[in-house]
Amino acid sequence: MAEKSYIYRIAGPVVIAKNLNARINDLVRVGDEKLMGEVIKIQGDHVTIQVYEETTGLKPGEPVINTEEALSVQLGPGLLYSIYDGIQRPLKVLEDKMGSFIQRGVDADGLDPDKKWEFKATSSAGDVVDPGMIIGEVEEKEGMTHRIMIPPLPGYEGTIKTLKSGKFTVNDVIGTLVNGTEIKLSHRWPVRIPRKVRNKLMPTIPLITGQRIFDALFPLAKGGVAAIPGPFGAGKTVAQQQLAKWCDAEVIVYIGCGERGNEMTEVLTEFPELEDPKTGKPLMNRTVLIANTSNMPVAAREASVYTGITIAEYYRDMGYSVALMADSTSRWAEAMREISSRLEEMPGEEGYPAYLSTRLAEFYERAGRAMSLSGKEGSVSVIGAVSPPGGDFSEPVTQNTLRVVKTFWALDARLAQRRHFPSINWLTSYSLYKNTLKDYYVENVNPKWLEYINRFMDILQEEEKLLEIVQLVGSDALPEKQQLTLEVARIIREYFLQQNAFHEVDTFCQLEKTYLLMDTILHFSKVANNALEEGVGIETILVTDAKDKIAEVKFVKDYKKELAKIRSQMDREFDKL
């Protein structure tokens, strides 16, 4: 008879068991309270486990049981409008069982096992199916169709023997294949394994965010990856919440990974109240929240990003565009560092594990626009916040993130102190998607879009050079042409780049409005430069009224009419000059 497996040693969230017959990534139950853990290292008869719950009070000698399954999430109807912890336990269910504080050793199904869903079959007996194929639909939330797919797992190919429409729970059998395999509304998927797709597609469609600085200067493609690094208080969380509210993805997955409890509380109380601008229904109808605050066990924080990206891939496979917000990947990296030090691994730079860059790359690589196995086109766009200590972008997490992302939105504490929001530094940020998205803007907005953006960037870069001279000799010593450049740059910064997240109109800016604002600002630049060449003094140009009215257009719904008025007033003023 095999020896009973037991706890041999405990070091924080890392437990070493003896006599445990296990494979890497097996899910195990640790101690008398059956705490959830995952096998991460095997050395002889010593098996190292990272425990996803608090290990205080565990003692050597307590039993360890192997479930012989990998850490998986349950995928099916009921994910939307849910709030989970890092290992897909619904917080509402945990609250009902335990009250305000999460105790350990409590299990909860990821999906409500009792709720019945109205399933409409779109396939029938005799149809030949492959893994990933759509066989029916469930209305998950008002306006959100959940497409039921054959699980992309071995044994799920062949001919349908039975398939029936009706009301079912996620664990009921809705049909069978000729080979005897049962089909249910839900299935499980191991979080560390990316879901398969037919092929990946080029990122040629922008993720429209309604934030001018993102849409115009540093766009992100659907299926793209972006990083928002910034020091404490620079506005990362507000920027990510704005993206979650307004970006044109059909499903939002928001991972609060190691953030402070009060920040997550804000998200959890605010999101259910928000109205979806597209449908008028609650925004939570198409949102999954994963809350793993900084006082929760670190191992679950490490798992939370994988839980989130697996749910995002599941909705991509249905043919939806998904935006995943990870706030913040620095806390995830810190969890890896803590576990690595408990494992006594050789530390890399600043104590992070040597495999930090590999893990970051593996996570961001799961983004992309793809043709799914069901034949539908979907995408997962990943936006990861990074919290470098002291705002130091040279630290390992920021640097390793920079290697794999193509859009970099650098937050600047100095801009935040000047109340310039969103406080994205236009000189250090960049996007490598501009050229691949060019055709979209030409067809859907205006052929001059890219030209205008390049002119804006030239003016802002020119301003930076001139400001160094201004600090030495003052702006009056500059030639008039350069004084005008400084004025145009000020208009771009204050009237275009600044955006009020809390104003009902300015919180979201359509692409057309963004283009017309750029067009009006550049029109002022053109007529003012012409006036200078005609011999008009710079002081006279700077006191014209029309240019300052551009600031008011941001807060107006009927922007076309207002901008046309401003433009004609501008022309009249300069004609008089």
Image: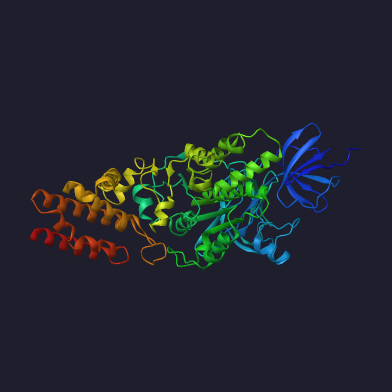
72 or 16: nearer the eye? 16
Q: Residue at x 66, y 32 (%)?
A: 346
**From the viewer's perspective, is residue 317 above or below residue 500?**
above
Q: Is residue 63 left or right of residue 321?
A: right
The front one of 100 and 560 is 100
Where is residue 432 drawn, in percent x and y? 39, 40
Q: How is the image coloured?
A: rainbow
The residue lying toward the viewer, choosing from 288 and 379, is 288
Q: Is residue 21 left or right of residue 523?
A: right
Res 320 visible: no
Name the foreground residue: 573 vs 171.
573
Q: Residue at x 28, y 62 (%)?
A: 551
Residue that extends furthest to the front in the rendered view of this protein: 473
Q: Position of residue 219 (x, y in %)?
A: 38, 47
Give how far across and how far down residue 18 sits, in percent: 83, 38
Query: Residue 558: where, in percent of width, then height?
Result: 28, 67
The residue that appears at 79% across and 52% down in the rendered structure is 34
Q: Quadrant of the N terminus?
A: top right
The quarter of the picture where residue 373 lies is: top right
The quadrant the C terminus occupies is bottom left
Count of numbered tags = 0
Give left or right: position of 247 versus 310. Answer: left
Q: Quadrant of residue 261?
A: bottom right
Residue 236 in view of the camera = yes
Q: Residue furthest right?
A: 1
